[in-house]
Amino acid sequence: MPPTALKLAALPPGYISRAALHGPGAAESASLLIADLRGSVVDLVATDGQAGAAGEDGVAVAAAGAEWSAVYLYDLTECVVLLPLMKGSVMIHNCKKCIVLLGVHQVRGRLSSTPRAASC
């Protein structure tokens, strides 16, 4: 994982939206790390102020500028992760009892239990 990755890590349980991604270097980061979460919903599809944003064809889309080359999901437990359509890849490592909804070029995983992933 690149040292310049944007990070969502070690946050308290709850709903985590795209608003949590704002901050120094957010626009320049090519990768995203989501790590050390338990009992959270991470919704990176909905834009601020609206749940479940959709394009003209009804497919969930990300806000402009959210093109990550890679997303890393590490050490998540009992989480739901909603990722936008993207051209990059997702690495799922050591996640337990999670549901991940995504549309990506490649999904890779290791040491994860009860995986449930859906891609389009």
Image: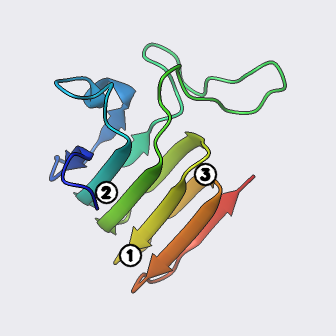
Q: CA distance from mark 3 to mark 1?
A: 17 Å
Q: CA distance from mark 2 to mark 3?
A: 19 Å
- Residue 21 vertical placement versus 50 (above, below): below
Report the residue at 34% width, 47% height from top. 32
Report the residue at 46% width, 36% height from top. 44
Q: Which residue is mark 2?
A: 39
Q: Which residue is mark 1?
A: 96
- Residue 36 vertical placement versus 83 (above, below): below
x and y percent of residue 103 in the render? 66, 50
Q: Which residue is mark 3?
A: 102
Q: Amino acid at mark 3?
A: Leu
Q: Secondary structure at mark 3?
A: strand
Closer to the observer: label 3 or label 1? 3
x and y percent of residue 34 in the render? 31, 53
Q: Secondary structure at mark 1?
A: loop
Q: Is residue 111 left or right of residue 103?
A: left
Closer to the observer: label 2 or label 3? 3
Badge 1 density bin: few <14, some 14–19, many ≥20, Cα 10 Å: some
